[in-house]
Amino acid sequence: MTGPVIAGFTKSECLCEPEEINFAQNVDEDAHITVPEWRLHKVQSPIELKHDETNEYDHFEPLEFHGHWDHGGDATLNNNGFTATLRFQNREMPVLVGGPLHEDQYIFEQLHFHWSDDDHSGCEHIFEGQAFSMEAHAVHYNKKYGDFKNAADRHDGLAVVAFFLKATDDDEHPCFNKMTEAVKKIDKINSTTSLPSDCLTWIREAAQCKGYYTYQGSLTTEPYTESVTWIIYPTPIHVSREQVSEFRKMKSTPCERHNIVKNVRPIQTPPAHKKLDIIYARSHKMSE
Ligand SMILES: [Zn+2]
């Protein structure tokens, strides 16, 4: 995942290798070189989620999305050679509050996607042994740190909401079409296109479910900082196979010989002494 971190990961040179580039492998090889030791004391992401190993909790405040699917301002989608990244401009940024985020407000920075060369290995987190076709990450930073850059290095700096997407033989998801139509226009690396500002309506239904998993983990791209409160909705959003396939047509190099075929970091295994503390937010605290 991530925001400006990913934005810095642009393929400025053509690698001109004969095979498709496997970013996941490249990224993973760097993981333990680029992360300072002090940042590796907790949990690296992604992880496999197993419901039986989580603690159920019913006492969070409601998790609230403010403005994520509203009309207004502008939206752009960019191909940085690694993923497609959605950003908003000229509007008040959406805000995430409540749930496991304590009293803090988290401001929307960007949303991006992970996918693979097939329809059943394109997600980063694994749920009950099952992988999905894609995983979308809505990245937010803690308002008290001012901006994403300042927040990205703090233990409570970022909140990332993850949604699974499952490719099916069914019709295309009409709301998700706003994304895929834009993806078709950013096949070239470093290209950007505009899209309707209410382009996130496809996450609205999933985001209003009460059951989600949350844990403290890390960015899944460099610099892998352990600054992320993950919020993961387990029920996949159904899209068509054709909609997923549009993402694989994006180019990863200026020579246009290589596509972004896989941008998934492998599952990370925590140190033996470290027990994962994963919470299943089954329902929220009732208002009095
Ligand atoms: Zn991501």
Image (cartoon, rainbow, N blue to C red):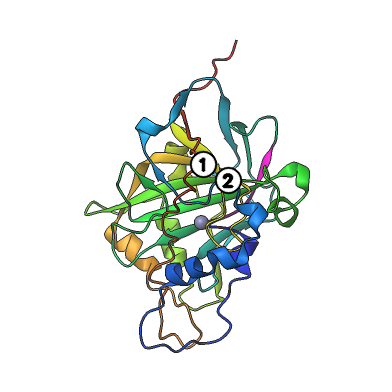
At 45% from the left and 44% from the top, the residue drawn is 203
Considering the numbered disc 1 on the image, is that residue within a helix, a strand or a loop?
loop
Q: Please identify, in this view, whether the residue under mark 1 or under mark 2 is nearer the observer.
A: 1
Percent across and percent down for residue 35 are: 62, 61
Q: Is residue 93 left or right of residue 14?
A: right
Whether residue 77 appears in this view of the structure is no
Image coords of residue 175 (percent x, y)? 41, 50
Q: Which amino acid does label 2 sit on?
A: Lys
**At which x and y percent is residue 212?**
45, 34
Q: In this view, does 105 lie above or below 8?
A: above
- Expressed as whole percent of the image width and height from the top left, the position of residue 258 reads 41, 81
Quadrant into which the C terminus falls: top right
**Callout 1 environment at 10 Å: few (<14), some (14 to 19), or many (20+)?**
few
The vertical placement of 174 against 185, above or below, is above
Q: Which amino acid does label 1 sit on?
A: Lys
Q: Give the range drawn in magenta.
A: 105-110
Q: Main secondary structure of the magenta part?
A: strand
Q: Is residue 116 left or right of residue 263?
A: left
Is the C-beta separation of discs 1 and 2 under 8 Å?
Answer: yes
Q: In the image, is residue 106 part of the stretch drawn in magenta?
A: yes
- Based on the picture, tell me whether residue 82 belongs to the magenta stretch: no
Residue in the image at 45% along x and 75% along y? 187
The residue furthest front is 273
In the visual, does 114 lie left or right of 141?
left
- Is residue 282 at least partly visible in the picture? yes
Q: Name the residue under label 2.
A: 42
Q: Which mark is residue 274?
A: 1
Residue in the image at 51% along x and 74% along y: 81
